[in-house]
Image (tube, rainbow, N blue to C red):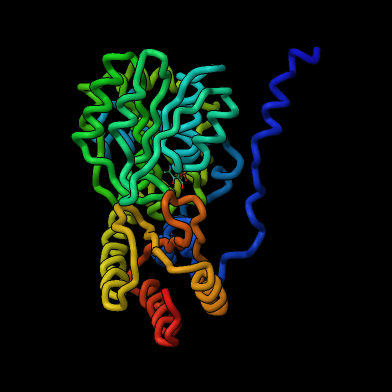
């Protein structure tokens, strides 16, 4: 009996924090890389009109979403698996490719759930580090690829580092992985902001799976993501889907979200806000890392600067993140980027702190 549940002991090593309970509704939320502005009343009224008794009383009709996502990406419906956020897309890949003692290659640091799933699935992790420019050491990654590896997970761009991996590097990885019979998941959660994709490589590389998310461009609360691969792999991944992938509410919200191109419009607005913020950083000599995502990392001088900025931004109800996991750098803070209005508010507060001769 005891042996049968030995696994429980391993689970004790996995730390899962409860999501915090603070009400973020009235804050400028620059902490979780969501949409920072409000959806328009026009869009919300369209959603309200679509919600009726059936939305709540019936099981979801997710098939419509498969059609829409297939059309959006110009792929066959059978090559898609819809998931509750790209988080579950990543979990699906663990379910298909990883078993006890399998070896999984991933970046360190990367999206936190990759470590959690690796432990839950009792995989051996091979972690690849970053250089001082926060570029992934892809040569090291390539050296680690062998027949023994079951899955390589690369977030492109990566979080929390924010940078893209060049396509030629990805292709090198895919080629060597293919020769060694290794599957590669490219997590394109931030695709809306990087514009870089491996989707066009799916035909060439039978070992490639791409995951995407609707969280970063406006629907984080709906929990919608998806996987795309060749139909053979997708149909295997599809076997792990829950009976209903996402809720009826999410189905309806996504239909309208796509119809009114909310995500596309938002990423254009965000770009303007990002440019404004970067201009401000340059003017004030504030050190930042180039980012291909909807967040930006700022390099500060000391713990004291973090404390002062935290105290000041808290007063203005601006939420942000102190990043403790960025390699080579101790004092990093992260802001989610947003359109001009939200960035102006942030710039205003940061200017105030900066003008008080506080060292960034
Ligand atoms: C790199 C990366 N991948 C995946 C996810 C999961 O996102 P979601 O489940 O909201 O699609 C995140 C979330 O922040 C992320 O940063």
Q: Position of residue 230 (x, y in %)?
A: 30, 21
State the residue in front, 105 or 315.
Answer: 105
- Quarter holding residue 35: bottom left
The residue drawn where x is 28% and y is 45% is 164
- The total number of labels drawn is 0
| Residue 87, x across and y down, in percent | 49, 38
| The one of 175 and 29 positioned closer to us in this rendering | 175
Above or below, comparing residue 14 to residue 49 in the picture: above
Residue furthest to the right in view is 1
Give percent across and percent down for residue 161: 38, 50
Task: Answer whether residue 332 is visible to the viewer in this image.
Answer: yes
Specify whether residue 64 is in view.
no
Q: Quadrant of residue 64?
A: top left
Residue at the (29%, 52%) spot, across then down: 292
Work out which quarter of the rendered image holds the N terminus and state it.
top right
Within the displayed image, which quadrant is ligand 1 positioned in?
Answer: top left
- Closest to the observer: 88 or 147? 147
Res 206 quadrant in image: top left
Residue drawn 23% across the image and 22% down it:
175
Where 129 falls versus 4 (above or below)? below
| In this rendering, position of residue 72 left or right of residue 153 | left
At which x and y percent is residue 252?
Answer: 45, 46
Q: Is residue 311 above or below residue 37?
A: below
Q: Which quadrant holds the C terminus? A: bottom left
Give the residue displayed 34% in from the left and 67% down from the top: 287
């Amino acid at each position: 009996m005891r042996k049968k549940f030995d696994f429980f002991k391993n689970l004790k090593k996995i730390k899962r924090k409860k999501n915090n309970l603070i009400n973020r509704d009235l804050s400028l939320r620059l902490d979780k890389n969501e949409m920072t502005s409000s959806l328009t009343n026009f869009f919300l009224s369209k959603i309200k009109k679509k919600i009726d008794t059936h939305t709540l009383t019936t099981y979801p009709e997710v098939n419509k979403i498969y059609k829409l996502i297939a059309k959006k990406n110009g792929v066959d419906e059978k090559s898609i698996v819809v998931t509750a956020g790209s988080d579950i897309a990543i979990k699906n890949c663990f379910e298909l490719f990883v078993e006890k003692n399998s070896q999984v290659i991933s970046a360190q640091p990367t999206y936190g759930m990759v470590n959690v799933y690796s432990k839950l699935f009792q995989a051996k992790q091979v972690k690849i580090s970053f250089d001082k420019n926060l570029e992934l050491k892809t040569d090291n990654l390539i050296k680690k690829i062998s027949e023994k590896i079951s899955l390589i997970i690369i977030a492109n761009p990566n979080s929390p580092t924010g940078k893209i991996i060049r396509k030629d590097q990805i292709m090198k990885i895919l080629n060597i992985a293919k020769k060694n019979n290794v599957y590669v998941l490219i997590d394109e959660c931030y695709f809306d902001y990087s514009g870089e994709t491996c989707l066009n490589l799916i035909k060439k590389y039978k070992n490639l799976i791409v995951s995407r998310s609707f969280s970063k461009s406006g629907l984080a609360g709906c929990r919608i993501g998806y996987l795309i691969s060749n139909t053979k792999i997708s149909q295997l991944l599809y076997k792990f889907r829950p009976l209903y992938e996402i809720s009826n509410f999410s189905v309806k919200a996504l239909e309208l979200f796509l119809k009114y191109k909310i995500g596309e419009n938002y990423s254009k607005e965000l770009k303007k806000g990002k440019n404004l913020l970067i201009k401000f950083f340059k003017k004030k000599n504030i050190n930042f890392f180039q980012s291909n995502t909807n967040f930006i990392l700022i390099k500060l001088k000391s713990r004291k600067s973090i404390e002062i900025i935290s105290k000041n931004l808290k007063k203005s109800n601006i939420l942000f993140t102190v990043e403790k996991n960025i390699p080579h750098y101790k004092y990093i803070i992260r802001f989610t980027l947003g359109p001009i209005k939200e960035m102006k508010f942030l710039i205003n507060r940061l200017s105030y702190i900066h003008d008080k001769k506080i060292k960034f």
